[in-house]
Amino acid sequence: MAAPRARPLWRCPKCGARFVTKNLWHSCGRFSLDDLLARSDPPVRALFRRLAACMRRHCGRRVVLLPQKTRAVFMHEVRFCSVQPRKDHLRLGLVLRRRLAHPRIVRVEDFGHALVNHMRVGSTADLDAELGGWLRESAETYGRRSGRLC
């Protein structure tokens, strides 16, 4: 028997952003990646492009990148990774079920059902297989409605 089809994502009529549930709070607006990266040094803009390629390689080509006012998020159906460009590095927030014990981790937010592991990505050397595994884990665990904890 085939699995039931998931409801389509709700699209905000003002900004076009897609969400799992209707009227989910968001900073409604149209934002560009160029504007988001404008204050970052050129190597950080290149690092962001390399991160996006790493994300597609580890999480699939259908991963969606959404620029927002102060960050960009990656999602399938649900946002599972945020990226805040800084002048000289990127700050990643990965939604996971566990706390990562690694020198890259600068802060962990506990939301009860999920932990957001914040890490500093300062060079292409940080875009390694270990990070790729964490990206995949986050995408598989939280990137789809069926995989989310309730």
Image (cartoon, rainbow, N blue to C red):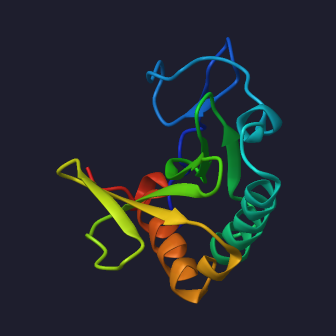
Q: Toward which corner of the image does residue 43 lie, by quadrant? A: bottom right
Determine whether, in the image, residue 118 is placed left or right of residue 71. Answer: left
Q: Percent position (x, y) of residue 124?
A: 70, 76
Determine whether, in the image, residue 114 is placed left or right of residue 89. Answer: left
Q: Toward which corner of the image does residue 38 lie, by quadrant? A: top right
Q: How many marks?
A: 0
Between 63 and 116, the one nearer to me in the picture: 116
Between 2 and 40, the one nearer to me in the picture: 40
Residue located 60% across and 38% down the image: 8
Residue at the extreme left: 112
Q: Percent position (x, y) of residue 34?
A: 82, 37
Determine whether, in the image, residue 91 is placed left or right of residue 88. Answer: left
Determine whether, in the image, residue 3 is placed left or right of residue 13. Answer: left
Residue at the extreme bottom: 129
Residue located 26% across and 49% down the image: 150
Q: Percent position (x, y) of residue 81?
A: 52, 55
Q: Percent position (x, y) of residue 108?
A: 28, 58
Q: Is residue 21 above or below residue 131?
A: above
Residue at the extreme top: 14
Between 81 and 71, the one nearer to me in the picture: 71
Q: Toward which corner of the image does residue 35 lie, by quadrant? A: top right
Between 37 and 78, the one nearer to me in the picture: 37
Residue located 66% across and 72% down the image: 123
Residue located 66% across and 17% down the image: 29
Q: Is residue 129 above or below residue 1?
A: below
